[in-house]
Image: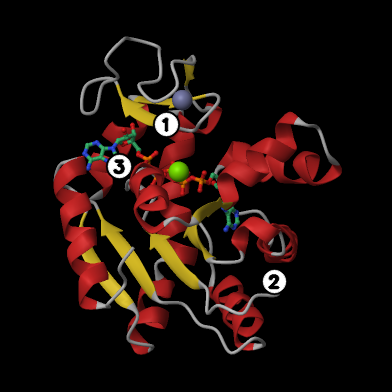
Amino acid sequence: MPDTIFTPTYLILLGGPGAGKGTQAQWLMVYLGLVRVASGDLFREHVRSRTELGQSAQRYMDSGELVPDELTIAMVMDRLSRADCRYGAIFDGFPRTVGQAEALDCALAEHGWRIATVIDLQVPFATLMERLSGRWICSVCGGTFHATMNPPREVGRCDFCGNALYQRTDDKPETVANRIQVYMRQTAPLELYYQQRDLLDLIDGTQSVAAVQVAIRGALTQRRLHP
Ligand code: AP5
Ligand code: MG
Ligand code: ZN
């Protein structure tokens, strides 16, 4: 964790595969002036650069299973130690197990810090399947679109930076089905974990992207989290 005289702000985006974590993180970064720490993106970078971690992570990702906690926690803590995290971070896809949540709480508590809120995007499984099958992502800035539900202005091009869009290899229907099962089994228990700590803000993730954004702003205001 970087040394800082500020109390950094840490937010968690929780929700199943395709719930809209990446989509909402995109504007939240600008709105709150915080960096996004997306464990899935970090793993995909390692896979692309063919690091040892990338090679270990790939087989889990390809089958829709979680990468083991030990590897995941070490990677995220390393990311958090960088200077651009000194004001805090928006976690997207982390933590994903109770073990990861406890490790994060411990790391923050060492500095007297804590999570400010957990935004839980709630979307039924059938919608998740539909969203992931039509998802297109920017290869450069991570901008996220959907062929029919959130189309880019020009087919195959990112609205934000103009670069090419691609589809993720783990968005195949059979892998998505397993990712949803894994979410239910290993990540859904975090709802109770954060509810018991009075940090859980439930958001109806089935609304339009803009309406979800409004709901998140409302939850942040309730928690006195302003830009
Ligand atoms: P990760 O990359 O984190 O994937 P995920 O959690 O499965 O979630 P997605 O990125 O698929 O969905 P999203 O919620 O970001 O939705 P998006 O905004 O793109 O993880 C991938 C893999 O890495 C894991 O399976 C695991 O192997 C490994 N991993 C990662 N983190 C790990 C961890 N902590 N521990 C262990 N392993 C880990 O939106 C989806 C689509 O819907 C888009 O097309 C979008 O345009 C559209 N959409 C979004 N919002 C709306 C809306 N409101 N209305 C209509 N369409 C919408
Ligand atoms: Mg994502
Ligand atoms: Zn882009």
Q: Is mark 2 within 8 Å of ligand 1?
A: no
Say if 158 sits above or below 13 in the image.
above
* Circle 1 SS class: loop
* Colour scheme in use: secondary structure
The residue located at (43%, 67%) in the rendering is 11
**Which residue corresponds to mark 1?**
143
Which quadrant would the N terminus be assigned to in this image? bottom right
- Tag nearer the camera, 1 or 3: 1
- Find the distance from the CA under tag 1 to the CA under tag 3: 18 Å
Q: Is mark 1 within 8 Å of ligand 3?
A: yes
Quarter of the image where ligand 1 sits: top left
**Which residue corresponds to mark 3?**
128
Q: Please, what is the three-letter code of the amino acid marked with disc 1?
A: Gly
Mark 1 crowd level (few <14, some 14–19, many ≥20, 10 Å Cα): many
* Circle 3 SS class: helix
**Which residue corresponds to mark 2?**
1
Q: Earlier in the sequence, mark 1 or mark 2?
A: 2
